[in-house]
Amino acid sequence: MPDLLEETDDASLAVCIAGVDATIRGPHSVVAVLERTLVHAHRSRGEAHERTSIRITKDDFVWQISGRSARSMKALSASSVEPQVAGAVVSALISDASEAAGLCVWRAAVVERDGEAVAFVGDDWESALVLAAHLQARGWRLLGGDYALIDRSTLTALELESCCT
């Protein structure tokens, strides 16, 4: 079990992602990066039926990120800088929120035109993003370049912006 940071160094951030209230607790330095990263996300008011929490701890060897779902558990070297840790926290947050909301998360670039969406999914993620950028330059709207939230019942790609703002 990692040694928890002193209470005076802890901070928290409450956001609402995909209709799920999430609380992130951890070192002030990481939460400060997350506040800037998630600046457009709704701030949680505790009104959602689904809730999750992410905890960030650090010892001499490792940063640990833990949430409610198995996919949100992450470990990074203690030498990782705060923006790297914050990126892993966002990934954990998306995993937990999507699971609580009944959504699938795919690593994908998603574009839309005339109400129809296309998700570019695969091992060569950078190529998918480049292809999505080319289509965006030709009138398609970019819905997401990192993750696609997919409604399991309809296989519909949700616009990430609508889940976060």
Image (spheres, rainbow, N blue to C red):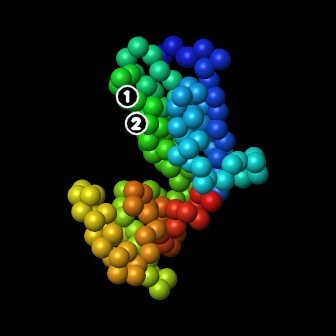
User: Which secondary structure, mark 2?
Assistant: helix
In the rendered view, would you say 90 is above or below 111?
above
Q: In percent of the image, x 59 and y 41: which residue is there?
A: 35
Residue 125 vs residue 32, the one in the foreground: 32
User: Which secondary structure, mark 1?
Assistant: loop
Q: Disc 2 marks which residue?
A: 84
Q: How many marks?
A: 2
Query: Tag on residue 80?
Result: 1
Q: Callout 2, which amino acid?
A: Gln
- Tell me how far mark 2 sits from mark 1, CA to CA: 6 Å
In the rendered view, would you say 71 is above or below 103?
above
Q: Callout 1, which amino acid?
A: Ser
Mark 2 burial class by Cα count in 10 Å: few <14, some 14-19, many 20+: few
Q: In percent of the image, x 56 and y 25: which residue is there?
A: 27
Residue 19 position, x and y percent, is 65, 56
Mark 1 burial class by Cα count in 10 Å: few <14, some 14-19, many 20+: few
Residue 9 position, x and y percent, is 61, 20
Residue 47 position, x and y percent, is 76, 51
Q: Residue furthest bottom?
A: 114
Q: In percent of the image, x 66 and y 42: which residue is there?
A: 14
Residue 102 vs residue 163, the one in the foreground: 163
Q: In which quarter of the image is the C terminus?
A: bottom right
Q: In this view, does 92 lie to the left or right of 77?
A: right
Q: In percent of the image, x 72 and y 52: which residue is there?
A: 48
Q: Do the residues labelled 2 and 1 touch (CB within 8 Å)?
A: yes
Residue 120 position, x and y percent, is 32, 67
User: Is residue 135 visible from the viewing direction of this image?
Assistant: yes
User: Is residue 96 visible from the viewing direction of this image?
Assistant: no
Query: Tag on residue 98?
Result: none
In the rendered view, would you say 28 is above or below 129?
above
In the rendered view, would you say 50 is above or below 86?
below
